[in-house]
Image (tube, grey):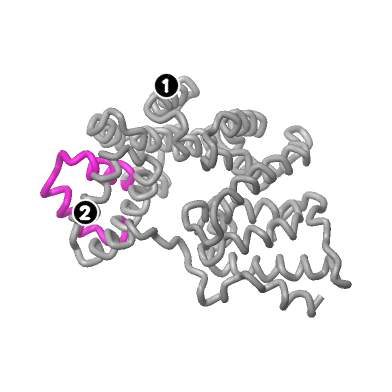
Amino acid sequence: MVRHTSGLAAGLPADDDVLLDVPDERLAPALVAAGRGEYEAAAKLLAATREAGEWENRDRYVTRLAAFARSRGEWFDDWRFAAPHDPDALLVKAELEVARGWESPARAELLRGVTPLITAAAEGDPGDPVPWRVALDHARGTNASHTVFERLWAEAIRRSPHHYGCHVSALQYLSAAWYGSHRECFDFAERAAQDALPGSLVQALPVRAAFAYLTSEEGPGPSAKVPRERLDEAADLAIALSREYAADDPWPAEVRNLLTYVLVRLERWSDALEQLRLTGPYASSFPWDRISDDPLGQFLELRDGVRIEVAAARPLGGRGTGRGSLTSGSH
């Protein structure tokens, strides 16, 4: 096992080279400028995504800029003062306030007060689906009924039928942890994946449903048992999607991190090692921040554990099957 463990490090970057939540080449300069108190780069970036209809990039950038504004908000305050009706600033503001509301003990009450901000963001560009992703997150936090959810979902997919962020928000609403069930969650995810465009991250929705099931607070009890075969099929679909992207590509990094977690829980060690090699240096906070206060440390620890498991499965140089029984706890 010791002999194989060292060899299995091939293709994996050194621990010191692994980075958490690395921004892409377009977002990074905007964050650097915001760190200097300058909002213009962020404003220009989001305007470009809106004008070009780059909704997936826009969603990611809005989320990251809002998170940065939470810790260092001077640049954003200046932007809001200079352009109070800018649709991009309105969207970041809505995302920012929803994120703040989620962390309060009075979450539902605070989030209800954010409704006018979401409405303003949606009216800023009627064709933009991202405000409706924010609205779906908001609905989950305000205990909105299925009727309200379905209305918001219809508005979202009317603007962008295959928008990944909106699908993720809808999946969370339908999960057993919130207002649905494991069955509803998987059914929604599998239908969406089947209808997804080639190479779309929407094909990773079933593995997100698997993650929700495996991390359910109630546990995967017998009354809501999801067959192992369904979990493996979700993982297999995400593996096929991952292989459509180049190794060390930051775009699918979060999906690859999530897939790795699920593969580990399914004890598919060889498959997990393949994803770690494809992921390269791009660790993401999600899903590791769900199980550890140190997501980067958790990622690195898990890499070592996967290598040890793969090595243990082939002490004589053979190849392991990569599959095992469903575990009951996280690794």
Which label belongs to residue 151? Answer: 1
Q: Which residues lie in the magenta part?
A: 70-96
Q: Is residue 221 left or right of residue 24?
A: right
Q: Which of disc 2 and disc 1 is earlier in sequence? A: 2
Q: Is residue 73 left or right of residue 130?
A: left
Which label belongs to residue 76? Answer: 2
Q: Amino acid at mark 1?
A: Arg
Report if residue 93 lies within the magenta region: yes
Question: In x, y percent, where is residue 182?
Answer: 65, 34
Dividing the picture into quadrants, the one containing residue 257 is: bottom right
Q: Is residue 216 visible?
A: no
Q: Secondary structure at mark 1?
A: helix
Q: Main secondary structure of the magenta part?
A: helix
- Residue farthest right in this picture: 316
**Front-most of residues 292 and 46:** 46
Question: In x, y percent, where is residue 61?
Answer: 35, 50
Q: Quadrant of the C terminus?
A: bottom right
Q: Amino acid at mark 2?
A: Phe
Which residue does the image show at 43% across and 23% down from the upper left? 154
Q: Quadrant of the N terminus?
A: bottom right
**Front-most of residues 197 and 262:** 197
Question: In x, y percent, where is residue 20?
Answer: 47, 64
Report if residue 64 lies within the magenta region: no
Q: Is residue 127 visible?
A: yes
As drawn, 33 above or below 161: below
Q: Is residue 130 left or right of residue 10?
A: left
